[in-house]
Amino acid sequence: MKLIAIYKRPEDPEAFDQAYFNTHIPLLKKVPGLQKTTITRIKRSLIGDDVYMIAEMSFSDEASYKAAMKSPEMAAASENLNGFASGLVTLVVGTEQDRPTTSS
């Protein structure tokens, strides 16, 4: 199970990065059940919004995701996120599915 944050390009990328990597990521590291966070920097958007970055937060299963979302640690991370990324972030929840991209 993944919680995926999609960030639009901020007006001040340097200030965003400072807030994200120096404050937000340390808060996320405290969230119970969070196995891994993968950050992808977007070089350019081809269609749609000007996306700056995507963060994928991985949980072992739906139960661990739900417990994490109810935790005080996630509440603190969410409050922090709202302080510097309000209006810039879209959050979605999904599961990975491996499927071939070509037919055999």
Image (cartoon, rainbow, N blue to C red):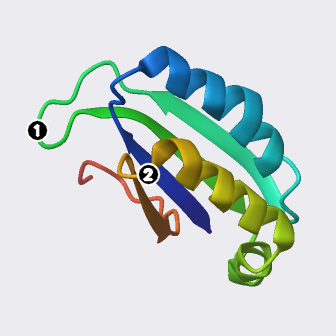
Q: Tell me residue 39's x, y (percent).
A: 57, 34
Q: Quadrant of the N terminus?
A: bottom right
Identified at 66% across, 50% down, the residue is 80
- Examine the image and state in which quarter residue 65 appears: bottom right
Q: Nearer the viewer, mark 2 or mark 1?
A: 2
**Which residue has dot 2 on it?**
86
Identified at 44% across, 65% down, the residue is 92
* In the displayed structure image, the side of residue 5 where residue 34 appears, left or right: right
Label 2 sits on what residue type? Ser
* Label annotation for residue 97: none
- Looking at the image, tell me whether mark 2 or mark 1 is earlier in sequence order: 1
Residue farthest along the left direction in this orientation: 47
Element type where label 2 sits in the image: loop
Q: Is residue 45 above or below residue 79?
A: above
- Examine the image and state in which quarter residue 55 appears: top right
Residue farthest along the front direction in this orientation: 83
10 Å crowding of disc 1: few (<14), some (14-19), many (20+): few
Label 1 sits on what residue type? Ile
Identified at 76% across, 80% down, the residue is 70
Identified at 51% across, 62% down, the residue is 96
Q: Tell me residue 104's x, y (percent).
A: 27, 52
Q: Is residue 69 above or below residue 91?
A: below
Q: Tell me residue 66's x, y (percent).
A: 71, 82
Element type where label 1 sits in the image: loop
10 Å crowding of disc 2: few (<14), some (14-19), many (20+): few
**Which residue has dot 1 on it?**
47
